Amino acid sequence: MTKDEIIHHLAHTPLTQLLQQADQVRKKEVGDEVHIRGIIEFSNYCCRSCLYCGLRKENKNISRYRMSPEEIVQLALDIARQGVKTIVLQSGDDFAYSAQTIATIIEQIKQKADVAITLSLGERNFKDFELWKKVGADRYLMKHETADPNLYARLHPGKTLTERLKAISVLKTLNYEIGLGCIVGLPGQTLDTLAEDILLIKQFEADMAGIGPFIPQKDTPLKDHPPGDLELTLKVLSLVRITNQTIHLPVTTALATLDPEQGQLLALGAGANVIMPNFTPQRYEKNYNIYNNKAKVTLALTKNLIKRAGRKSGQGKGGSLKCKKLPKD
Ligand code: SF4
């Protein structure tokens, strides 16, 4: 699909038509399984200043926490005992955890549980990424946030899109399964930018992509900017599925926050095939407030949702499906 065609779909194609097409592609290419990834938000410290995020270092209105390595490992093993086959370790860009500390956490989880590990720890150097891959990390989520370099620079003081994409390229060369993703509804974003986002995901041959609406956070410079549009977010999600047929697409928590009643079901109908329930202990989780009123997605709610959608929970680790053919039904 060309950029002009994507822009045309975003502007003029009825949502129902895109949903139908995306759902057909999803069914044919990745089947009815919905993969469950258990997420642990182990630190809300961050050295960055992203204008939209409540974890930005300037925000003095949140209580900061760091889980200890032992706490993280124990929680990961507990999640694995509940049958979840992927553990997602996520934090702000928090350099208080050395590369070796993270490596030890990965090693200890891998030694005791048969799970895949996804990291979402922000931009680190080549050596850190290399070490973590060597000790067993499988995947890395590094959302590109927006493919517009000027908008990226405005929203991420001191950072550039070029640096971000370079970090993603490094992860690719190290054989991580990689996850990109963008925010829909950023100030100054256009349909042209969103088309670029979709093409960038394709260009990087991403294994996963997180597409979520912008949600304001009360203690950030973007607190008064309106949330992203549900229909537009679903259109972007559908088009990512249509253009990247075997990609893993999570139902983002931001979508569940934007529309607590229908958001997740709609995303499952728009090509999504992954849900990431949150296992962060409640005493910490309430302080991981990247945006206002973040929805709580539990394992029980996730399983219930998968049933309601007429789908089935994924049984394996749900690795990349790129270049793999599904067995015939
Ligand atoms: S988006 Fe990520 S890097 Fe930016 S402030 Fe929030 S946690 Fe930090």
Image: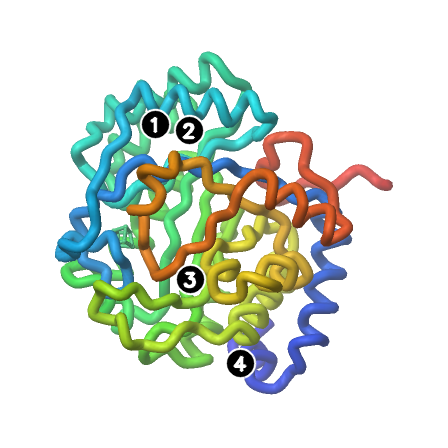
Q: Quadrant of residue 226?
A: bottom left
Sequence-wise, the earlier of marks 1 and 3 is 1
* Foreground disc of the pair 4, 3: 3
Sequence-wise, the earlier of marks 2 and 1 is 1
Residue 79, horizontal then vertical, whole percent: 50, 27
User: What residue do we see at 18% from left, 55% from top?
Assistant: 61
Sequence-wise, the earlier of marks 4 and 3 is 4
Q: Is residue 37 left or right of residue 214?
A: right
Residue labelled with disc 3: 182
Q: Quadrant of residue 192?
A: bottom left
Residue labelled with disc 4: 7
Separation (CA) of disc 4 from disc 3: 16 Å
Amino acid residing under circle 3 = Cys
The image shows residue 171, relative to residue 5, as above or below, that is: above
Q: Secondary structure at mark 3?
A: strand
Separation (CA) of disc 2 from disc 4: 37 Å
Residue 151, horizontal then vertical, whole percent: 28, 72
From the image, which quarter does the N terminus lie in? bottom right
User: What residue do we see at 59% from left, 63% from top?
Assistant: 261
Sequence-wise, the earlier of marks 2 and 4 is 4
Q: Secondary structure at mark 1?
A: helix
Separation (CA) of disc 2 from disc 3: 23 Å
Label number found at residue 132: 1
Q: Secondary structure at mark 4?
A: helix
